[in-house]
């Protein structure tokens, strides 16, 4: 049984991962900003295993420090950190991009990952074991038009993962970087500010990945033998050839 902290656990990949790892008998710390969604998920998963919930915004350093610092002693020993929280806002050329959108993506996808990791890594180093899973994107592999800032933040996740691996391997800490392709979640709904018709068009004409597909991959990495580290994993739906190319029916 592992103690696993998951950011962005109230929906999409984070929620699917929490559900799967809870079913496998792990103790789960679910983290998110929406109190009602967290409470609902905690109630659901508590039927399966021990669950603790933390309400905080990864973009706010003081919020991160306060929330993680408030963990009871019996929850402080974290074996696995899954940095899943992140966002995409807008799909505009740089000349027309909204700086608030840029700040939100940089603060959530990059700084938030760093803030949470900084809180968890010292404990892992002390006990010389641990596992960090960072959720990147195939957007890190190939920049696409009108998504420059989002792609840049996910490229940063790749670089941070590589740097973590260089710094932490000697302490017995595994680092896994996962790059999902097109996954049908609320991702596009958030990107397009609630425009459900435009969001649905992203997944029309082909079978996109489901959140559960990525959860399966994360579970595989987390459950690998001690001597095995899955360093990087790229996952596409069968209809996607590369980040910009999807074959639709």
Image (tube, helix red, strand yellow):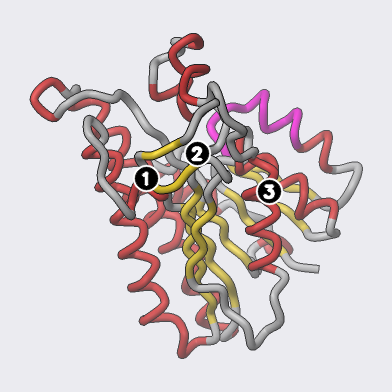
Determine whether label 3 and label 1 are within 8 Å by CB.
Answer: no
Quadrant where the C terminus is found in the figure: top right
Magenta stretch: includes residue 40: yes
Frontmost of labels 2 and 3 is: 2
Residue 182 marker: 2
- Gap in angstroms between the C-alphas marked 1 and 2: 17 Å
Residue 38 image point, x, y percent:
67, 32
- Gap in angstroms between the C-alphas marked 3 and 1: 18 Å
- Magenta stretch, residue numbers: 32-41
Q: Is residue 54 visible?
A: no
Residue at the spot 39% in from the left edge and 66% down from the top edge: 161
Q: Is the magenta stretch mostly helix, strand or loop?
A: helix
> Local crowd at mark 1 within 10 Å, few (<14), some, or many (≥20)?
many
Question: Which residue is denoted by mark 1 in the rendering?
Answer: 109
**Nearer the N terminus, badge 1 or badge 2?**
1
Closer to us: 226 or 121: 226
- Gap in angstroms between the C-alphas marked 2 and 3: 17 Å
Magenta stretch: includes residue 201: no
Residue 3 image point, x, y percent:
71, 63
Determine whether label 1 and label 2 are within 8 Å by CB.
Answer: no
Question: Which residue is denoted by mark 3 in the rendering?
Answer: 17
Residue at the spot 69% in from the left edge and 65% down from the top edge: 220
Residue 120 image point, x, y percent:
51, 65
Closer to us: 32 or 85: 85
Q: Is mark 3 on a helix, strand or loop?
A: helix
């Amino acid at each position: 049984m592992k103690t696993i902290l998951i950011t962005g656990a109230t929906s999409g990949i984070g929620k699917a991962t929490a559900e799967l790892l809870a079913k496998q008998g792990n103790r789960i710390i679910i983290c998110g900003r929406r109190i009602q969604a967290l409470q609902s998920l905690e109630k659901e998963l508590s039927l399966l295993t021990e669950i603790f919930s933390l309400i905080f915004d990864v973009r706010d350093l003081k919020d991160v420090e306060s929330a993680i610092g408030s963990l009871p002693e019996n929850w402080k020993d974290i074996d696995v950190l899954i940095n899943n929280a992140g966002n995409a806002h807008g799909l505009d050329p740089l000349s027309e991009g909204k700086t608030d959108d840029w700040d939100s993506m940089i603060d959530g996808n990059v700084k938030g990952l760093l803030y949470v990791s900084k809180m968890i890594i010292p404990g892992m180093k002390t006990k010389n074991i641990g596992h960090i899973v960072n959720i990147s994107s195939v957007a890190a592999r190939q920049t696409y038009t009108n998504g420059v800032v989002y792609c840049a933040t996910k490229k940063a996740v790749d670089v941070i993962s590589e740097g973590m691996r260089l710094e932490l391997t000697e302490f017995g800490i595994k680092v896994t970087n996962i790059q999902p392709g097109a996954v049908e979640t609320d991702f596009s709904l958030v990107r397009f500010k609630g425009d459900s018709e435009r969001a649905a068009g992203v997944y029309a004409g082909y079978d996109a990945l489901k959140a559960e597909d990525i959860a399966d991959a994360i579970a595989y990495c987390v459950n690998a033998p001690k001597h095995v580290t899955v360093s990087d994993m790229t996952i596409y739906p069968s209809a996607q050839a590369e980040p910009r190319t999807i074959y639709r029916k």
